[in-house]
Image (cartoon, helix red, strand yellow):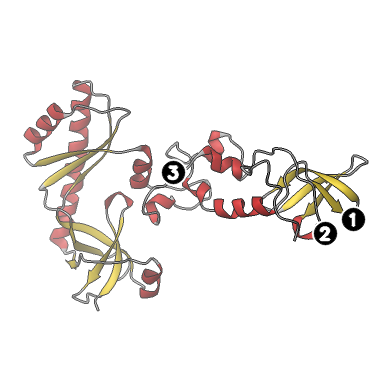
């Protein structure tokens, strides 16, 4: 079986390819690989078979054609200059035609048989005349692709509030819906600056631990429930879902924090509405 390696393409994209010719490769080696539009210039990103297996590459069909030679490096440099020229020209034509769109990135295929212009826009844009201008100038196939703000962040890459690279540009294969309800269920601040990513949308990681929070909510008492503790009958005034702890108030008005695992078992009375998503008639299971 041919060795599988991971390569890095333009726009922070990562793909798995075969190495059927058993080329000796090390990290950051430049290679020429098969792509959707012919040959593509890439660099080796991962070669360790154990790490590649952890990423579950699935069915890999494309191959590494050869290691990049001097003429391939020169061709790549010329392509980068072409992309700069195409970006400047396209931006000027967008302004001249007063189109409501913003150019994000330009990418030329390795053999220059296609130039792709990525742009963002709030609404649909009629760019047919712009395509004619670009085709006349560069005499090759022109393609315009509209990106969403999340797709743009994925291509540009960067670091999130956690200090690590964006999930979408490293390992996240597809975007999933993220809502404010997820933040509420995890008792997070609803300040947009704290729960939004670089793309301006809610962070994808809000969904990662949601199942654990929901499980904890189902096992813990609701606000207003009456618990039997070492200090007598107390009323739950708030919960800490992640730490699985409850704050209770005794009959004398004192407040205490108790880990849920330390609450003695026994029957309890259901509480009021705490907006946790559980139905009013469900008092939840007894304490463990």
Which residue appears at 18% of the width and 75% of the height?
Answer: 21
The circle on residue 177 is 3
Which residue appears at 47% of the width and 47% of the height?
Answer: 204
Q: Which residue is mark 1?
A: 230
Q: Earlier in the sequence, mark 1 or mark 3?
A: 3
Name above or below for residue 200 compared with residue 11.
above
Which residue in the rendered view is the most extreme toward the front? 281
Give the quarter of the image for residue 117: top left
The circle on residue 264 is 2
The alpha-carbon separation of the residues under discs 1 and 2 comes to: 8 Å
Dot 3 crowding, Cα within 10 Å, few <14, some 14–19, many 20+: few
Element at label 1: loop
Q: Image check: 206 left or right of 147? A: right
* Residue 207 percent location from the top left of the image: 51, 49
Which residue appears at 41% of the width and 69% of the height?
Answer: 54
* Residue 261 percent location from the top left of the image: 76, 60
Determine whether label 1 and label 2 are within 8 Å by CB: yes
Q: Earlier in the sequence, mark 2 or mark 3?
A: 3
* Residue 9 percent location from the top left of the image: 27, 55
Q: Image check: 50 left or right of 124? A: right
Give the quarter of the image for residue 188: top right
Does any portion of residue 158 appear in the rendered image? yes
Q: In the picture, which quadrant includes the C terminus? A: bottom right
Q: Image check: 180 left or right of 124? A: right
Viewer-nearest residue: 274 or 41: 274
Dot 1 crowding, Cα within 10 Å, few <14, some 14–19, many 20+: few
The alpha-carbon separation of the residues under discs 2 and 3 comes to: 39 Å
Element at label 3: loop
Q: Earlier in the sequence, mark 1 or mark 2?
A: 1
């Amino acid at each position: 079986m041919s060795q599988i390696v991971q390569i890095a393409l333009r726009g922070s994209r990562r793909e798995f390819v075969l190495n059927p010719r058993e080329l000796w490769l090390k990290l950051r080696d430049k290679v020429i690989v098969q792509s959707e539009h012919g040959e593509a210039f890439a660099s080796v990103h991962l070669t360790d078979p154990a790490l590649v297996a952890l990423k579950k590459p699935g069915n890999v069909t494309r191959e590494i054609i050869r290691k990049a030679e001097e003429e391939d490096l020169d061709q790549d440099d010329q392509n980068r200059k072409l992309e700069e020229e195409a970006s400047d020209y396209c931006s000027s034509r967008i302004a001249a035609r007063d189109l409501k769109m913003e150019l994000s990135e330009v990418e030329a295929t390795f053999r220059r048989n296609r130039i792709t212009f990525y742009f963002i826009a709030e609404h649909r844009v009629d760019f047919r005349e712009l395509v004619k201008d670009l085709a006349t100038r560069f005499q090759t196939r022109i393609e315009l692709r509209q990106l969403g703000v999340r797709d743009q962040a994925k291509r540009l890459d960067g670091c999130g509030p956690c200090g690590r690279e964006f999930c979408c540009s490293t390992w996240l294969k597809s975007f999933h819906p993220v809502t404010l309800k997820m933040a509420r269920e995890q008792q997070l601040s609803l300040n947009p600056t704290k729960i939004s990513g670089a793309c301006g949308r809610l962070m994808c990681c809000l969904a990662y631990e949601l199942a654990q929070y929901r499980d904890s909510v189902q096992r813990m008492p609701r606000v207003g429930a009456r618990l039997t503790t070492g200090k007598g009958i107390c009323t739950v005034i708030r919960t800490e879902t992640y730490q699985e702890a409850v704050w209770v108030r005794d009959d004398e008005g004192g407040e205490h924090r108790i880990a849920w695992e330390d609450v003695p078992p026994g029957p309890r009375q259901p509480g009021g509405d705490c907006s946790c998503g559980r139905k009013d008639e469900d008092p939840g299971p007894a304490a463990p």
